[in-house]
Amino acid sequence: MYTKESPLVSVIIPCYNHGHYLHEAIDSVRQQTYPALEIIVVDDGSTDNTATVAQAARPLTYIYQENKGLSAARNTGIRHSKGEFLVFLDADDCLYPDAVAVNAGLLLENSALAFVSGSYTLFFPSTNQVQPVVRQVEGNHYQHLLRGNYIGMHAAVMFRRWVFDNFMYDTSLKACEDYDLYLRVTRRHPVLHHGHLMAVYRQHGTNMSGDSKLMLQTTLQVLAWQQQHLQNTIEQAAYRDGINIWKAFYTQQLAHKLTKVNGFSLHDYLSFLKNDPDLSLHTLRSSTSSIAIFNKMIQILPSGKIRKKLSSIFTMDRTPAVGGVRFGHFHRYTPFSTEFGYDRGGPVDRYYIERFLGDQAHDIKGRVLEIGDNSYTLAYGGERVTKSDILHVDESNPSATLVGDISHAPHIPDNSFDCIILTQTLHLIYHFTEALHTCFRILKPGGALLLTVPGITPIDHGEWKETWYWSFTDKSMKRLMEETFPGGISEVTPYGNVFTATAFLYGMGLPEVPKTKLMYDDPHYQVIITVKATKPMVP
């Protein structure tokens, strides 16, 4: 029974040969706290037990069609649905019990919204690991989507029915049909995104998102369709960023695949070479399996000319001969900026800091302490933060809620914080081990320290030049965390490569560095090191 207060929600479940998962998806809908639901299973030409599972789970609407693909299956579900709101749940995924109620409530609160989207959890069945994916996005949704698909999982989205009076899923796309729809809708209508966990996204060997070459091609195709609609320089910049970010993301996946001979194909490599030639050649030549890969390529190449060309690419040494290096703009004794690139669009290391905090955003919750200011707390914690504290050494700072030195702060009670954000600060503290001991003491059991420290870096010319004491490595941070977080769990990760380290030392701004260069990490050139340290629970 549905009312004005609880309008009918249609949950559409397309299924193609995922009958062994389907009952879990259906059960997750039946367990919703929201009272007014209809379930529509669209069997897209399955040859397994999908029909048997769906019919055994009645009452629901079961529709069979010849195999036409995911977009067509969703469109079929739309045409057979009756709900005022619509949710699309893949047969191998599940909804959290309050998912429908949360999104429906937000749509009811704001009648202008075309859709509302939430966060989700990645589930890895082979290891039983779970990983929450929480992104905070407020406003300018079209611009954010041009840079990347922050939504990530369509089951976390609830649409109004009228959206599909104007838009349908594009059946010409083999992938990224959801990303394409989000872009088309947000270009014209307001939407909302939030951090509440809505659904579980099962990661297994048959996920379409695992096909890096297909995903790269279709993502770039979807973005290219938006180019004619860009209305200003901000959208144009977001579009260019998106192209670079997607290329970097999927070429990294192709690089990993390339090192596995059994998973390699010529078409993968050529796509890799087209989108990031530097990384493709580096990966091929540095791989321990490179000779086997090359031999396999030779066997499947169609002609002698192409074989010869590829052979020259493979054997080409892009390293200049001794005496042949061209210095160009780097032939100077002074950097382009002495302000870490702030005067050129922002520092290079900020990319790694924000990438780290974005990945760990689900830990920024409850009572959070940040040093100096609370900008990262607000940006990445959002509604999960119940109290935001700022620790500052200067009592004249009006924004500080606590005053003192983190390396000696006996006035801060034990077990006070769910999370501490300590970015690019430890190197300014001479007794830095004492600062880490304080963090351990004032964290609640189960609380997280999110820490970043500099590795390869310029030294400040201004305010901090007299107190810039240290640089670190991943090895030193691992040892430090073992000593200062006894019994805790620490994840230490270095970020950077020789290109970004050089750019940072010369003071280049972040906008000047191609995104494809930023996303490749080489542990021999550590620009920053990140640490997530969790205080052990009380026995």
Image: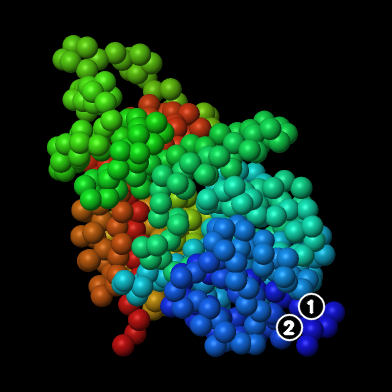
**117 vs 24, nearest the viewer:** 24
Residue 216 visible in the current orientation:
yes
Query: How many residues crowd mark 1 within 10 Å: few (<14), some (14–19), many (20+)?
Result: some
Question: Where residue 533 sits in the image (x, y, percent)?
Answer: 34, 66
From the viewer's perspective, is 184 left or right of 410? Answer: right
Q: Is residue 381 left or right of residue 454?
A: right
Residue type pointed to by label 1: Pro
Q: Residue at x 61, y 51 (%)?
A: 171
Q: Residue at x 44, y 28 (%)?
A: 508
Q: Is residue 399 visible?
A: no
Image quadrant holding the N terminus, namely bottom right
Colouring scheme, one of rainbow, by chain, secondary structure, one colour = rainbow
Indicate which disc residue 7 carries. Answer: 1
Q: Residue at x 46, y 70 (%)?
A: 47
The residues bearing labels 2 and 1 have C-alpha atoms spaced at a distance of: 7 Å
**Would you place residue 141 above or below residue 74 in this image?**
above
The residue under label 2 is which amino acid type?
A: Ala
- Residue under numbered circle 2: 36
Q: Nearer the viewer, residue 49 or 153?
A: 49
Q: Where residue 379 sits: x, y (%)?
A: 57, 56
Secondary structure beneath disc 1?
A: loop
Image quadrant where residue 161 sits: bottom right
Q: Are marks 2 and 1 in contact (CB under 8 Å)?
A: yes
Query: Is residue 377 shown above or below 331?
Result: below
Q: Quadrant of the C terminus?
A: bottom left
